[in-house]
Amino acid sequence: MTQHSNIDQGDAQLAVTGMSCASCVGRVEKALQAVPGVSAPRLNLATGQAHFHAATPQALAEAVTALDKAGYPAAPLETRLGIEGMTCASCVGRVEKALAAVPGVSSASVNLATGSAHVTHSPATPAGFLAQTVTAKGYPTHVVADHSAHHMHDHGGDAATLRRNFLIALALTLPVFLAEMGGHALPGLHHWLHGTIGQTRLWLIEFVLTTAALAGPGRMFFRIGIPALLRGAPEMNSLVALGAGAAWLYSTVATFLPDLLPENARHVYFEAAAVIVTLILMGRWLEARAKGQAGAAIRRLVELSPDSALVERNGNAVELPIDQLKPGDIVHLRPGERVAVDGILTAGSGAIDESMLTGEPVPVVKSPGDAVTGGTVNGNVALTYRVTATGADTVLSRIIRLVEEAQATKLPVQAVVDRVTAIFVPVVIALAVLAFAGWLIATGSLGDALVAAISVLIIACPCAMGLAVPVSIMVGTGRGAELGLLFRRGDALQHLAEAEVVGFDKTGTLTQGRPALTDLATNGLERAEVLRLAASAEARSEHPLAAAIVAAAQAEGIALSEAQGVSASVGRGLTAHVEGRALLIGNADALAEGGVSADADLLERGQGWAKDGATPVHLAIDGQHVAVMALADPIRPDAQEAVAELRRMGLRTVMLSGDVQATAEAVGAKLGIGQVIAGVLPEGKLRAIREMGKDTVFVGDGINDAPALAAARTGIAIGTGTDVAIESAEVVLASGDPLGVSRAIRLSRAVMRNIRQNLFWAFAYNVALIPVAMGVLVPFGGPQLSPMLGAGAMALSSVFVVTNALRLRGFK
């Protein structure tokens, strides 16, 4: 049991586990009253909440300890943090390490793509202290109070700031670059500048412009990177600060104190320092803009909720902000308007576009009594509905929460990246020192040695490694939400991609979950007359088969008559008088017991339907066998296509059902399912799932499916099913369409393929180009990268990773 909260001292609230009776409440209150600094404890057995006043943080911590000793431990808290300044995988590892070291923290997962952390911790550890701990490490952090209300990190704001900084740096850098490198394009330019301005004055101008670029738009690299370096925890900004700073410092010495350098080493590298900062700012800007696009799915979901609604107040309809709505309010929904919050339709019938919820483009016709969901769009008919949920309790808020929690999850594949990035930056710095020493020894040129060291520092890109996994998860789960595929846990993406077997529950998953009239045969009477008489007799029965007959008559607009003398026989059927005629409705045994001679053709039709899994119901009027009806749980419209699609994907399918073997096998044969396991209770389903192997997916909808959903490596719940099933699953199909299973598996495969591409690029890039930057190919006639080319390659590396992940937005 967990709760989302951010409590410190003062009025405190804890979720207490293990309370089952009034005696438990008394013991918990007694335990809290004995804690110094704790006063006015109040316990609610129904909610499991303890409310009290804690005078100090120490009192709160002691209250948690007292509950543990009393045998009623407080449930852990889940806190979300918004973190600024993280730029690479090293930052992520550093923040996670800092959080994990806080007493009371049981787990911490940091996401570079969203700029967030998800921390599970003891209530004795204040959320504010977690934020302070990370801030002290150089990453400004705040507690996110309501993560369902907005997207975690404003990459749009980041992009605007970085764009401005890039343009300022570009304006300052361009003259420096042209002064030093323009001669390669215009051979006479270099000599003309030296002859007109003079070398010393030219270097002074370059010094001023480069210093302005580093101290202005480039200040962020030094502000973050140097303190991290001094703490012995270097990261991406440290590499940039070292590289650009070294080029600037060497050039400054050459300009103002040239006598400190050998005559052949008196060169300036101002253009390298300025171009490094400018190119990396460009890369950061493009990266932030791409990240903003990656998080667009959640922002679009957030924006679906309107700001106000037309609500009845004191007999009048008034426009109110949606945060003033409460359950029970009556809301008027105008044509074309978005539904403000969840509710039940009370007046009017019309089509509502639910594509934001289900991914299905066809509008759904709603009538009084049907549920409407906040964020969906009304058609062209005015409707009225009663509010049932607001705020964080709405379906839309829960969807946003699910997507954000999935995005915060670390996949198993991330473990490899974490191990590498933990030592990556220190290793790069060591390689830069090695390159400097090697070139200095080999060539005796201080300038060449400096160029090699700076190139190594600048070309290394832990950003790409840090973004490779989380940005793909971010885009993939967001796209899934748009398609009605809700990943409750991000690691389901990896597990689904590895699936080999898909097990289905039958009733409610592959079938509609309720009987319906599927066929009818008579020996002379009209269909409408058979339905009118049978439905009139069954109208007051609560049996599911009776309800199916009545629903069929109502669907065809048949008016029912009053039935007299209705008498039911368990397992057989019923007798009644309708319109002066004696009716007998039931199975073949009921006909025999009633002395009715069965019509051979009708009996044969019924037996044929029974072989196909339907239940035959016979009708006799005044002692004559006149009709037989087939009642069955209809197969969902897309179930057959869903199973066929899974087979085409190379997956084995199994159906598990508590139904009798004949019925289950009939349904399995129609759907083309390879293996049918029938007559199994929940324990049997659980055992069957375990026998299928570790890469098993189970799809279900009911309470009885919960154990199997939890036992399967990946549980997929039909969104129209029970809350228990949904809570037991890792993936939820919002539309209830079984075709969503193949969509979810295809999406997970696409995401994992995208992650592998990103990881290959990130690792191959660093493995290939760091040695080139060190100059190991120079003795063999190969190139040595300049710091400027290194900066461009590094900037484009992380942009490549994010851009590649954005391709998932086009997943069909």
Image (spheres, rainbow, N blue to C red):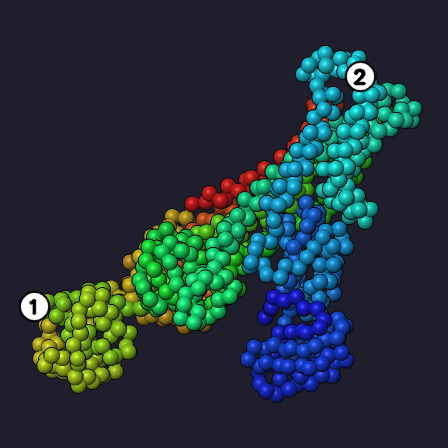
271 above or below 199?
below
- What residue is shown with label 2? 197
Q: Which residue is drawn at 63% across and 64% down?
A: 78
Say which quarter of the image contains residue 133: bottom right
Image quadrant where one finds the N terminus: bottom right
| Side (left or right) of 792 relative to 339 | right
Q: What element carries label 2?
A: loop
Kind of residue indicated by mark 2: Ile
- What residue is shown with label 1? 524
Q: Distance between the residues labelled 2 and 1?
A: 111 Å
| Side (left or right) of 590 relative to 264 | left
Residue 199 drawn at (x, y percent): 82, 18
| Side (left or right) of 612 relative to 733 | left
Say which quarter of the image contains residue 374: bottom left
Identify the mark nearer the N-term, 2 or 1.
Answer: 2
Q: Residue at x 41, y 49 (%)?
A: 650
Q: Is mark 1 on a helix, strand or loop?
A: loop
Kind of residue indicated by mark 1: Gly
- Tell me if residue 592 can be seen: no
Residue 810 drawn at (x, y percent): 46, 43
677 above or below 266?
below
| Side (left or right) of 602 relative to 673 | left
